[in-house]
Image (tube, rainbow, N blue to C red):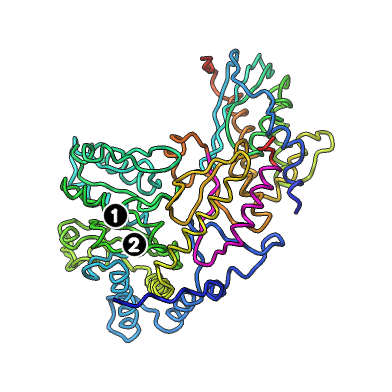
Amino acid sequence: MDLTELYQSVILENNRRPRNYRKLPEANRSAAGNNPVCGDEITVYVRLEQDRIADISFEGAGCAISQASASVMTQRLKGRTVAEAEAMFERFKGIVTKGTPDEEDLDLSAFAGVHQFPARIKCATLGWHAALNAIHGEAVTATTE
Amino acid sequence: MNPPAPAPDWTALRAEFPILDQTVHGHPLIYLDNAATTQKPRAVIAALSRYYERDNANVHRAIHELSSRATNAYEAARARAARYLNAASPDEIIFTRGTTESINLVAYVFTPRLRPGDAILVTEMEHHSNLVPWQLLAQRTGARLLFVPVTGDDGQLDLSRLDELLASNVKLFAFTHISNSLGTINPAAELCARARRHGVITLVDAAQSVGHLPLDVAALGCDFLAFSGHKMAGPTGIGVLYGRSALLESLDPFQGGGEMIASVQFDHSTWNKVPHKFEAGTPDIAGAVGLHAAMDYLDAVGRPAIAAHDEALARLAYDRLRGVPGIRLLGPPGARGGLVGFALAGVHAHDVVTFADQEGIALRGGHHCTQPLLRKLGVPATTRASFYLYNTPAEVERLVTVIHQAARFFGSAA
């Protein structure tokens, strides 16, 4: 296959200039995710107001797929309810495991090529797992050094 | 003295590795992940088939013909391994599953020898398999772990305080012969000599050197040496722990079971003699037979020639990769083992590996089981190209071209 199917321009661009890449001083949730096999590491910070993701950011180091996926994720989850975030992760998992794009969500669909690289699916979902863990987890105060 | 061997015909040798004759993603396979595992020549594959087709039986148990053939083949492999390492006797060769099990064996049987306040010395460039077993031993006994530092990107051990370290109640010093992520060749004989002056037992992790360099345990002066068959053209599942006879005699068994016993009562047993004392259960007989064939193969080619070939390819790769924008090369600029590790600014190793794979090139990306070292050097992951006797300068040139392309594709030069 052509590598540009895996590395769509959305992915390359978000990897070069990740969005919402910072600590979130006013976060009340955070969770770390790591992939011990590749060494991908990510921390997602969330400010949850009642049921809504008022703000979300991430930091980490890893491959283009994991970094771009987390970057796109923060843009798509900001302002969503917890239930909407869960539903969106389910859609995203469908895209990266089956390769069927979601016509209504072109940014998430950029990751459809990942399904041809089974070893990379966990890279694409790393940030999402951390975000959902943060949202579902106990309230923690993220460090704001 | 043997006359110098004629220079090997590398092209003819390459043709003896059937797996290399294939395309991957539409390109001829370029296999550069030899530090992870090497490919096998026909001679090794044929030895495995022949054993299973003609001689297979269990060893040291029955008195029938096949069992006697299997036992002879297994013990011949042990004798061959002793010759390969210049060990004093085949009794100094213990068959294991590989380097990892060899090191774990030593770490386990050393448990009664360590007490709180004692120390185990390793280096900062160890593979996890020569670090974690010692961490476990330290936890069991209350001993401390001490480290010989690595200087920096040039990947040398800082030996300035070695004697001070060795004098700090150190009982055992375990170090790698060749670093699997940096390519550094450590001065193993010097390290063993200095350890011996302090009465410290030494273990050499020879996983990355055994298939490349001539190895002579008498010249190295080590107490233990560990390696895997699959990194030296042999099968997976078989490895060796060399141990000095007197030392092996003084140690308790590792695992309990068949073959390691002399006599068993309901409430106690007595142990078989060395090396069988350390080999409980049915061993990997076919693996030992395959390893025997691999040792014959490598010595027929000539280990000095293989070492020179692999190092030449690694140095060519090191010199040519220097021209890639944003590249950071790890390990010594001069003499090195047959591998090169590097990082591209802004490009993760796994993206490099995926990119190269689409061009038919097999590389390894990640922390190479040396997480603490890469953390110290401040690189989360590196890409590694590792070479063996069937690789060619043309393959190195192709690698360099593809790494240039990857740097452009992911925009590291931007």
Local secondary structure at mark 2: strand
What is the span of residues highlighted in magenta in the rendered image? B381-409
Query: Is residue B108 at all visible to an observer of this figure?
Result: no
Asked if marks 2 and 1 touch (Cβ < 8 Å), the reply is yes
Q: Give the residue type at disc 1.
A: Leu
Q: Is residue B402 magenta?
A: yes
Of all residues shown, which one is farthest toward the bottom?
Answer: B65
Camera-side residue of A137 and B3? B3
B18 in relation to B149, above or below = below
Q: Position of residue A29 (x, y in %)?
A: 58, 20
Q: Report how far apart the C-alphas of labels 2 and 1 lie in the structure.
A: 9 Å
Camera-side residue of B121 and B329? B329
On the picture, is A126 further left or further right than B231?
A: right
Name the quadrant of the N terminus of chain B.
Answer: bottom left
Name the quadrant of the C terminus of chain B.
Answer: top right
Q: Which residue corresponds to mark 2? A: B96
Residue drawn 80% across and 33% down?
A105
Residue drawn 58% across and 41% down?
B327
Q: Give the residue type at disc 2.
A: Thr
Same-chain check, marks 2 and 1: yes
Q: Which residue corresponds to mark 1? A: B105
Chain letter of disc 2 in the image: B
Q: Position of residue B341 (x, y in %)?
A: 51, 47
Q: Position of residue B140 (x, y in %)?
A: 26, 41
On the image, which quarter does residue B75 sit in? bottom left
On the picture, is B67 further left or further right than B141?
A: right
B195 in relation to A45, above or below = below
Of all residues shown, which one is farthest toward the right?
Answer: A103
Residue drawn 44% across and 66% down?
B306
On the image, which quarter does residue A129 sit in? top right
